[in-house]
Image (cartoon, coloured by chain):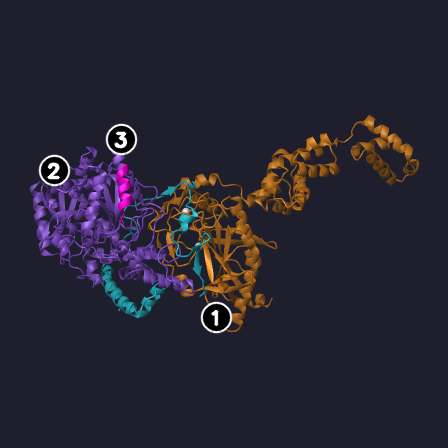
């Protein structure tokens, strides 16, 4: 588009990820999603007069874990600060967050966009509390005459991950977000349920004429909760800023909000309002001194991350594409690894996992996590196939049977008598019958028409309902006819 | 002597020997409240029925020889900024006029567990901001020694209730002198413990890094008994210190021979009423006669304490009081949009002094001023703390007047906020340093009580109690009571 | 005058306080007199002084990640000026 030729986009992202703790960051209320409005609350998360916060140790552990997964420096001294601003979903009208001494310092991750690898820097990551939820009487916030507040989410622990303004295209932004969410998923610090808002995105974007070196004025659009709204929002915002600049006007530095319904962004808070948060050290909490033993203890428990996982699968002979496909979601990658621990042939396994298993799950709209076929059961099926107990064709039908009944492959094969016939005696009898019944084909074969043998084999397989061992049939038939 | 006049320790004797029932005692206090409080206005809420029910329960336990709490059957009252489940907790503000907490402050729970009877909630300056209790939204509390004088503040109701025998003891909170100064003005014993010694959970915050709860009592012994019940680590307060809590009564020894007492010169500067200085001088002589080694010393940064205190306290307050917006609890003014609702609610719900401090604190934190004001004040706080550390290398205890003057007349200072702030010079440095300090009755000036302030190292409350007890045992100020005869009460 | 009327209006807006003309004038004057007094702090050289946030320094005060009972609806909304079917209600949120 025109924008792309004339202007260059500069984008930085703030990602808020809910950490997977049982309880809120400063009180013992559950973090469980859903639940009747204002039932997961207490004097502390409701900001009742006199209530005081006490930090949840697990929040710090998860923050350190995420920091390590994102190659961040972990601070030795860190503290909480109050970010002061008024909003109805903020029960104390200040957010307990971290200002100048965040728990995680510089880090980053590598993205790949059409073959191009690029390092995206992470400036910092800090712990803070989530706000409550506003429910509007009308379509959108702006068209509602009143709103209702539910504080169940107030105080749920968040990790805010701030990127450098290193992103210069929408595909890069999406790639970064996919990578980031994948890492948080693998590190098991967040359940990454985007549809439940457990990861949310703030987009800072500005335009400048190509070749310019100074940054243009940026806007920040808050609280996007899907990759697609990020894409749409950025397309809109880039176009809007381009129009403003083309008209010779200036972009206003401000906080904007995304109206999903109308597909536009709107002014939320203007600059001076937005930027006087009056941060100061939280006097109700003690600072953190994070000794290196603490960090190392957590490093020991850090799960294998996507990059390492892909490398390992490629080392087992999988193509980069297959490895990427299998490791996209941690649940699938774990399913693959479990099967692999029993069934050694990574390539065959990969083909089945990406092929029939995935197809089966998709048709039943079932996630790998709650697949009725366990990884071990799949491994057993493939073992039977290798042993020649069943044919590939039969294996596929057994897989479906396994899905619907949850039974083991061996059980199904036994019950339905699906094992291949590899008993020469039994086969020779059938072969004789077929030869006798098809003299013409025998003629053709002997006359040198090799195709004819295929027909005869087919007849034998038919006679044995596909259970004859095809290799053996071929061999025996040739002997007979020669 | 009326039972209501007795000390907690005397009452404990009577109760355990069944010479007096908690019900009789509670009734006596309620009668006393009905007689004098219409004039003194120490109470914002009196809980007659609940108190009598609790007293009956205490009597039953005593009768059946059950295990008793350390203060079983003793009636008491709380400053109205300490949360009491099901009982209105107003902070003497229109903002919280109808606020009924769904939970108890830790001190409320601990006093209940100790078997005390809650008589009611006491008046104070709105959100504990003030030194005269004149900033209460509801009413002025009068000083029982002279009904034309203020009781001091912000725990004015607590000091008056104890001085006028409307309770056996009371709790107050002290951010810059709010326990000690009213205790001095009303002639009772008031302790501001070390920051972190008593849990702040459920104490409605004014300035989080300075607030501390403490007892106001008729005697030093009573004070140790109450401290035994309320002090000690609380996991619900992140600033609560896990320290080895002693039995404070162990420090009640009538002997200070060889104890080193320092007299900080800066606490006797201009603004100190010469008669008050003279009175304290006499007190010092008494301690010398009792064997204390007294010498002058210096806390050079004292004069900087006032600006440092007011910047830190108001900055924290501006944030602590942001939650009062008319959404979850408290007063709400109607408006067509949220912004308007917030502004009107806070404009109408807060009093002048509270708004003034929110303005000052917001300004001190607003962009461009943080370093010049808040950060600077926190650095000065370090210097003030170091002054004390140095002094305590030489002395066990520091001594000063609790307040520059005796109780002043209503309206005398309220016209000029700065003048009111300056009168806190002898008390705010202690909160900045987080150390303990106690005010004990030390004589009279023009018929009004004055207080002697004793300051100690962090967690050295015991040493303060020892000096205070020895002084008390060798003087009779604490035995004198204000006369609240019919005439006095009807004279108004 | 360190603080202008505009400063006072800006601060009042930040603090969500609707001030009367009378209050605006009063606070402008009073904040000035208080801050004029605070100027004395500048006399102290504090470049090498560490700030004190807590008089008694504590570190790493944390609790375990264990669920404690929340309070029920009724308790949560008991004090709400405008609570209905379990929600706290507020008037229109206008985007400024
Ligand atoms: Mg944030
Ligand atoms: Zn809670």
Colour assigned to chain B in the rendering is purple
Kindly state the secondary structure of the residue where label 1 is placed. Answer: loop
**Numbered tag placed on residue A302 in the rendering:** none
Q: Which residue is mark 2?
A: B255
Q: Foreground residue, B445 or A357?
A: B445
B78 relative position to A268: left or right: left
Q: Is residue A22 visible?
A: yes
Q: Foreground residue, A360 or B345?
A: B345
Q: Main secondary structure of the magenta part?
A: helix
Colour assigned to chain A in the rendering is orange
Colour assigned to chain C in the rendering is cyan
Region of the chain picked out in magenta, as a range: B46-57
Q: Which residue is mark 3?
A: B64
| Residue A273 falls inside the magenta stretch | no
Dividing the picture into quarters, in which one does residue A378 lie?
A: top right
Can marks 1 and 3 be said to lie on one chain? no
Kindly state the secondary structure of the residue where label 2 is placed. Answer: loop
A137 relative position to B374: left or right: right
Q: CA distance from mark 2 to mark 1?
A: 78 Å
Place of residue A428 in the rendered image (x, y in percent of width and height, measured from the top left): 85, 28
Kindly state the secondary structure of the residue where label 3 is placed. Answer: loop
Tag 2: Cα neighbours inside 10 Å, few (<14), some, or many (≥20)? some
Can marks 2 and 1 be said to lie on one chain? no
Q: Earlier in the sequence, mark 3 or mark 2?
A: 3
Q: Which quarter of the rendering shows the C terminus of chain B?
A: bottom left
The furthest residue to the bottom = A248
Q: CA distance from mark 3 to mark 2?
A: 40 Å
Nearer the viewer's eye, disc 1 or disc 3?
3
Query: Is the distance from the Cβ of mark 3 to the nearest ligand 2 atom less than 8 Å?
Result: no
């Amino acid at each position: 588009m025109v924008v792309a030729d004339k202007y260059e986009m500069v984008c930085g992202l703030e990602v808020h990820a809910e950490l997977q703790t049982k309880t809120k960051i400063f009180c013992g209320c559950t973090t469980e999603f859903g639940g009747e409005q204002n039932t997961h609350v207490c004097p502390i998360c409701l900001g009742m007069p006199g209530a005081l916060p006490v930090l949840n140790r697990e929040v710090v552990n998860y923050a350190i874990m995420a920091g390590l997964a994102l190659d961040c420096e972990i601070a030795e001294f860190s503290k909480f600060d109050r970010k002061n601003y008024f909003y109805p979903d903020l029960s104390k009208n200040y957010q307990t967050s971290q200002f100048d001494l965040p728990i995680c310092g510089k880090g980053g991750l590598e993205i790949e966009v059409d073959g191009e690898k690029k390092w995206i820097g992470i400036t910092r990551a800090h712990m803070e509390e989530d706000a409550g939820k506003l429910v509007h009487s009308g379509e959108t916030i702006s068209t509602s005459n009143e709103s209702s507040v539910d504080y169940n989410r107030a105080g749920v622990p968040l990790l805010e991950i701030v990127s450098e303004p290193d992103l210069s295209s929408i595909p890069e932004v999406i790639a970064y977000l996919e990578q980031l969410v994948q890492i948080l998923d693998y590190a098991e610090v967040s359940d990454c349920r985007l549809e439940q808002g457990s990861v949310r995105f703030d987009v800072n974007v500005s335009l400048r004429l190509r070749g310019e070196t100074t940054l243009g004025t940026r806007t920040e659009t808050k609280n996007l909760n899907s990759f697609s709204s990020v894409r749409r929002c950025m397309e809109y915002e880039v176009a809007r800023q381009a129009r403003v600049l083309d008209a010779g006007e200036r972009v206003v530095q401000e906080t904007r909000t995304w109206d999903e319904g109308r597909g536009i962004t709107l002014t939320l808070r203007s600059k001076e309002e937005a930027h006087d948060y009056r941060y100061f050290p939280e006097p109700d909490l003690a600072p953190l001194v994070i000794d290196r033993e603490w960090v190392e203890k957590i490093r020991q428990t850090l799960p294998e991350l996507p990059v390492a996982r892909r490398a390992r699968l490629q080392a087992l002979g999988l193509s980069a594409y297959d490895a990427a496909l299998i490791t996209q979601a941690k649940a699938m990658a774990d399913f693959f690894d479990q099967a692999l621990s029993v069934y050694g042939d990574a390539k065959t396994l990969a083909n089945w996992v990406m092929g029939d298993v995935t197809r089966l799950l998709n048709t039943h709209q079932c996630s790998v996590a709650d697949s009725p076929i366990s990884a071990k059961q799949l491994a057993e099926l493939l073992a039977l196939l290798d042993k020649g107990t069943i044919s590939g064709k039969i294996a596929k039908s057994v897989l479906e049977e396994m899905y619907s009944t949850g039974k083991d492959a061996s059980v199904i094969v036994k019950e339905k008598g699906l094992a291949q016939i590899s008993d020469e005696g039994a086969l020779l009898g059938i072969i004789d019958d077929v030869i006798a019944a098809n003299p013409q084909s025998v003629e053709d074969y002997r006359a040198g028409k090799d195709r004819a043998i295929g027909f005869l084999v087919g007849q034998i397989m038919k006679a044995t309902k596909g259970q004859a061992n095809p290799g053996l049939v071929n061999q025996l038939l040739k002997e007979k006819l020669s | 002597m009326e039972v209501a006049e007795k000390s907690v320790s005397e009452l404990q004797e009577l109760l355990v020997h069944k010479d007096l029932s908690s019900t009789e005692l509670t009734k006596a206090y309620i009668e006393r409240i009905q007689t004098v409080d219409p004039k003194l206005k120490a109470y914002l809420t009196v809980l007659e029925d609940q108190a009598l029910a609790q007293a009956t329960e205490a009597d039953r336990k005593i009768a059946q020889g059950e295990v008793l709490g350390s203060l079983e059957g003793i009636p008491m009252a709380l400053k109205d900024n300490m949360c009491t489940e099901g009982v209105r907790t107003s902070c003497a503000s229109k903002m919280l006029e109808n606020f009924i907490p769904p939970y108890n402050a830790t001190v409320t729970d601990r006093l209940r567990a100790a078997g005390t009877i809650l008589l009611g909630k006491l008046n104070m300056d709105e959100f504990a901001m003030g030194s005269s209790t004149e900033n209460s939204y509801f009413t002025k509390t009068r000083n029982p020694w002279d009904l034309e004088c203020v009781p001091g503040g912000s725990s004015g109701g607590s000091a008056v209730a104890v001085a006028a025998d409307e309770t056996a003891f009371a709790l107050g909170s002290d951010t810059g002198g709010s326990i000690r100064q009213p205790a001095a003005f009303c002639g009772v014993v008031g302790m501001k413990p070390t920051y972190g010694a008593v849990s702040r959970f459920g104490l409605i915050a004014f300035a989080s890094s300075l607030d501390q709860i403490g007892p106001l009592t008729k005697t030093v012994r009573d004070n140790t008994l109450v401290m035994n019940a309320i002090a000690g680590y609380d996991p619900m307060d992140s600033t609560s210190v896990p320290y080895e809590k002693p039995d404070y009564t162990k420090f009640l020894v009538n002997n200070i021979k060889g104890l080193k007492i320092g007299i900080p010169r800066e606490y006797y500067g201009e603004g100190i009423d010469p008669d008050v200085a003279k009175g304290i001088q006499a007190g010092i002589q008494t301690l010398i006669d009792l064997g204390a080694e007294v010498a002058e010393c210096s806390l050079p940064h004292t004069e900087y304490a006032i600006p440092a205190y007011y910047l830190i306290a108001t900055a924290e307050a501006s944030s602590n009081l942001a939650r009062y917006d008319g959404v979850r609890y408290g007063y709400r003014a109607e408006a067509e949009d949220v912004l308007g609702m917030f502004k009107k609610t806070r404009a109408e719900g807060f009093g002048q002094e509270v708004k003034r401090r929110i303005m000052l604190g917001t300004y001190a934190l607003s962009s461009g001023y943080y370093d010049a004001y808040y950060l600077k004040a926190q650095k000065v706080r370090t210097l003030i703390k170091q002054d004390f550390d140095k002094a305590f290398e030489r002395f066990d205890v520091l001594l000063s007047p609790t307040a520059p003057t005796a109780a002043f007349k209503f309206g005398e200072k309220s016209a000029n906020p700065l003048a009111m702030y300056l009168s806190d010079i002898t008390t705010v440095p202690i909160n900045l340093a987080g150390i303990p300090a106690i005010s004990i009755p030390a004589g009279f000036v023009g018929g009004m009580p004055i207080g002697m302030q004793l300051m100690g190292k962090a967690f050295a409350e015991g040493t303060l109690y020892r000096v205070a007890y020895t002084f008390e045992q060798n003087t009779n100020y604490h035995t004198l009571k204000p006369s609240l005869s019919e005439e006095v009460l009807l004279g108004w | 005058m360190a603080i202008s009327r505009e400063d006072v209006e800006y601060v009042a807006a930040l603090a969500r306080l609707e001030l009367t003309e009378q209050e605006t004038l009063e606070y402008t004057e009073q904040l000035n007199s208080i801050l004029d007094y605070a100027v004395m702090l500048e006399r102290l050289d504090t470049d090498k002084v560490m700030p004190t946030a807590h008089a008694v320094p504590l570190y790493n005060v944390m609790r375990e990640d264990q669920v404690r009972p929340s309070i029920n609806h009724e308790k949560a909304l008991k004090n709400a000026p405008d609570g209905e079917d379990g929600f706290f209600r507020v008037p229109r949120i206008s985007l400024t």
